[in-house]
Image (cartoon, rainbow, N blue to C red):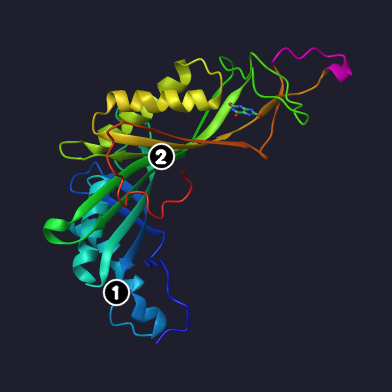
């Protein structure tokens, strides 16, 4: 029977499990501080239309599994942990056709102390604002099973105090922006990169490499627009990481406007700016290999990317 109304796309899971794993097999501890979100997709129509929970692996169980796997599987990298968890959920919930696990990782640095050149064994200080991320989607079972891995970072806040211009842009009756050949360029970068495959990739090392490539390209590339900078950063990652198929960016242009000190008879030669928090330009771009291949479900339900 139908009344012309049907259930559309849906998924469910436990969001933002704050999983902290300490490896304490030796006096020198290791910490992985994760925010883990799980979701299952598939035929969960009976739960929606009939109130029948027979197919539903509770979100509470998903939460428990996220914590149990931090011990049983461990967290050699956020991506490997997420693959294990997502694959498990497909085994545990027969109605699921795909499972997605998203992880945000906060980095902790060892506290520098006298007498320990490599930092303290079990005391840590939180590193900056930036977060490492991954989104793993596993779909299907058996020989048909497919796994997509996105790695990424968010809120990597960078600024260059010169080496940036913005000129030659289209102008119309509403254009008031003046051309500049010397401005501050700043952004809080979010990037996600899709692996064509992760076989043989040391994902922790690769994260550090990609981050370093993004930063050094930002630093050393003269910028005619944030768009050009993002493209240069994307190219540099693809040139150095053969197994990355594409990288997507979302970058708010954190405007710094020269403050008008002329009103007080004071010269402002690119020295005093007002940092405006909104509105901001939002520049988004994908840089991909021509033969990147179909992204499948890699980006499904990943918000904030073109
Ligand atoms: O790098 C920039 N890109 C733009 O598209 C733009 N538009 C704008 O007003 N300022 C800037 N800066």
Residue plotted at (19% across, 45% down): 26
Distance from the alpha carbon under mark 2 to that under mark 1:
30 Å
Pinpoint residue 201: horizontal percent, then vertical percent.
Answer: 20, 36
Q: Is residue 266 magenta?
A: yes
Q: Nearer the viewer, residue 174 or 279?
A: 174
Q: Residue at x 21, y 53 (%)?
A: 146
Viewer-side residue, 67 vs 244: 244
- Residue drawn at x 16%, y 39% as measured from the top left: 199
Occupied quadrant, residue 106: top left
Say which residue label 1 marks: 57
As drawn, 21 above or below 77 = below
Where does label 2 land, which residue?
153
Image location (x, y in percent) of residue 51? 39, 85
Residue at x 40% of width, y 82% of height:
49
Is 227 magenta? The answer is no
Q: Specify the quarter for ligand 1.
A: top right
In the displayed structure, would residue 260 be above or below residue 113?
above
**Side (left or right) of 225 relative to 130:** right
Read off the magenta span: 262-270
The answer to whether residue 26 is visible is yes
């Amino acid at each position: 029977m139908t009344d012309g109304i049907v259930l559309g796309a849906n998924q469910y899971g436990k969001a933002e499990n704050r999983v902290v794993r300490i490896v304490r097999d030796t006096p020198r501890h290791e910490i992985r501080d994760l925010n883990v979100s799980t979701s299952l997709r598939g035929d969960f129509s009976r739960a929606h239309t009939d109130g029948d929970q027979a197919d539903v692996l509770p979100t509470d169980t998903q939460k428990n599994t996220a914590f149990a796997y931090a011990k049983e599987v461990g967290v050699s990298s956020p991506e490997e942990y997420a693959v294990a968890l997502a694959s498990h959920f497909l085994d545990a919930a027969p109605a699921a056709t795909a499972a997605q696990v998203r992880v945000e990782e906060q980095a902790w640095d060892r506290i520098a102390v006298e007498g320990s050149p490599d930092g303290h064994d079990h005391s840590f200080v939180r590193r900056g604002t930036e977060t490492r991320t991954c989104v793993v989607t596993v779909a299907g079972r058996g020989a048909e099973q497919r796994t997509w891995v996105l790695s990424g970072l968010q809120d990597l806040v960078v600024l260059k105090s010169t080496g940036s211009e913005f000129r030659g842009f289209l102008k119309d009756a509403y254009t008031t922006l003046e051309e500049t050949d010397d401005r501050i360029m700043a952004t809080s970068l979010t990037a996600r990169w899709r692996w064509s495959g992760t076989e043989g990739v040391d994902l922790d090392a690769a994260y550090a490499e990609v981050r370093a490539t993004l930063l050094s390209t930002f630093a050393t590339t003269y910028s005619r627009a944030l768009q050009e900078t993002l493209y240069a950063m994307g190219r540099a990652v693809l040139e150095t990481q053969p197994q990355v198929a594409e990288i997507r960016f979302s970058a708010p242009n954190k405007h710094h406007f020269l403050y008008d000190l002329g009103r007080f008879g004071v010269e402002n030669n690119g020295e005093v700016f007002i940092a405006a928090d909104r509105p901001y330009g939002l520049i988004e771009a994908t840089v991909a290999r021509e033969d990147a291949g179909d992204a499948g479900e890699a980006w499904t339900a990943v918000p904030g990317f073109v």
